[in-house]
Amino acid sequence: MNKNYVLALMAAATTFAACSKKDDNNTPPPSSGSSDTVMVRDKIKSNQTWSKNKVYVLRGYVYVDNATLTIEAGTKIISNRDSAGVLVVYKGAQIQANGTADNPIVFTSGHAEKKPGDLGGIVLVGKATGNGNHAKLEGNVDAAYSAFGGTQDDDNSGTLQYVRIEYAGKAVAANDEINGLSLYCVGNKTTLHHIQIVNGLDDAFEFFGGSVNAKYLIAYNCADDDFDMDDAYHGMIQFAVSVKQPSFTDKKSDGDVSNNFEVDNTNPKNLPITTTPTTFPVLSNFTAVGPNNATGTSADYGYGMRWRRGTKFILGNAIIMGAQKAALRIDDNVTLGFYADGTSGLKTSLLHGSSDLFATADGSAAVVLDAAGLQNLVTGRDATKTFLAANAGDIKLKDPFNNKTPDLTPQTGSPALSGAKFEGKLAEAFFDKVAYLGAVDPANDWTKAKWVAWDRIVVTQ
């Protein structure tokens, strides 16, 4: 048997090894001659099912076009860095990826020593409402599949549940990338829950407009923003985790930084930030952990939350801690105005930064809210508690800054054990009315389930 062929099969079968700078070769993908390995290229135009008994190799861009792709629980889909695979489920198509807690569906690198960027990523494209901020899909997709959005907020792109996406991220050009999971105007009949993005080279989750809702999301050691929203995204999310590796960020330009949250309405280079409809996510029970100024922290880390460019938001019952710069930054008078008038709010949460807690910036002569004014609204009207730089331990999570195996469970005596409120937009039936703050139930830590992968440190030297 050909030696390269044997090595390739070994790479396909290897289970999730740690990243290493040593794997600089382009290991070829498994041969299509193997009955247990299926090469996937180009377009899927008829319904098909991927079996857990085979390994599927994404080669370049693969488009699901007016068909349903069903993926069995326990199926492994791999990609090699010589042709990083991107799965695009286009408008009118569906994916039915129904993993289970014990048998997740895993998209990952096909290399024995894996690197962020070995996989391109997963892209769902729907017909829900956006605001036109992006004229087409990012990432150099085929022009025939580049348009997105419409007026159908109840559009259905299928299901992703108990799915892990590892080592994704495809940078085509500056500010033109494929993320771990990209959601373009995806509708609210789509089902998203129990999804983890691991070691992504760009954003973990990016929502480009749309109304899709989600629960139980984890972004772990991704290089750019973990929850990026724009283009009038107006869905709801509950129980979500963001954990940052201190030394790992992507290459930056134009003063960009990596954040736990980065949320815009529009880019002013594309459209005025007052363009409607407006980005307006409603979010609850997030736990976001930044680098906390650990030894070796990248200079490109930014904020726990950066809300800007005309966005509105509600975030309640959350824990934001370890932000490298300000824990909460609001960038412009339009976005600040929404906070000042009560449209937006960081409600009933716990907020900690390793240096500053609050920052505002506009560039005009008169800022609607300065940092002190913002702090007064957050801690007063919105009942969020703040913790100074040296007092992250007062939040009393078990081991949040252990990047290898973080434990985000509240300890005895933690202020996160109670006090959650579900009022206003947070009273929607979508939200489970729990008592605790943050993503993790103190009596049942879902982040320790079999489908979740920790201990994936990216080698950055």
Image (cartoon, grey):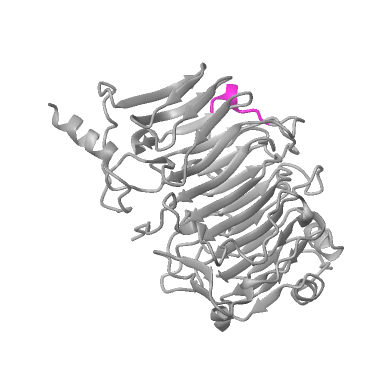
Q: Is residue 73 magenta?
A: no
Nearest the camera: 329 or 188? Answer: 188
From this viewpoint, which residue is outermost toward the right? 341
Give the left or right position of residue 76, taking residue 262 as reference. Answer: left
Give the left or right position of residue 382, taking residue 398 as reference. Answer: right
Dominant SS of magenta comes to loop
From this viewpoint, which residue is outermost toward the bottom? 390
- Which residue: 53% across, 31% down? 96
Of the 4 image quadrants, the one containing the C terminus is bottom left
Q: Kindly tell me whether residue 177 is visible in this rendering.
A: no
Is 320 drawn above or below residue 125 in the view shown?
Answer: below
Q: Kindly tell me whether residue 20 is visible in this rendering.
A: yes
Q: Is residue 142 magenta?
A: yes
From this viewpoint, which residue is outermost toward the front? 443
Of the 4 image quadrants, the one containing the N terminus is top left
Residue 314: which quarter of the image?
bottom right
Residue 132: which quarter of the image?
top right
- Which residue: 75% across, 30% down? 152
Residue 375 position, x and y percent, is: 75, 75
Nearest the camera: 107 or 434? Answer: 434
Residue 413 position, x and y percent, is: 58, 80
- Which residue: 42% across, 64% down? 247
User: Which stretch is magenta?
Assistant: 141-148
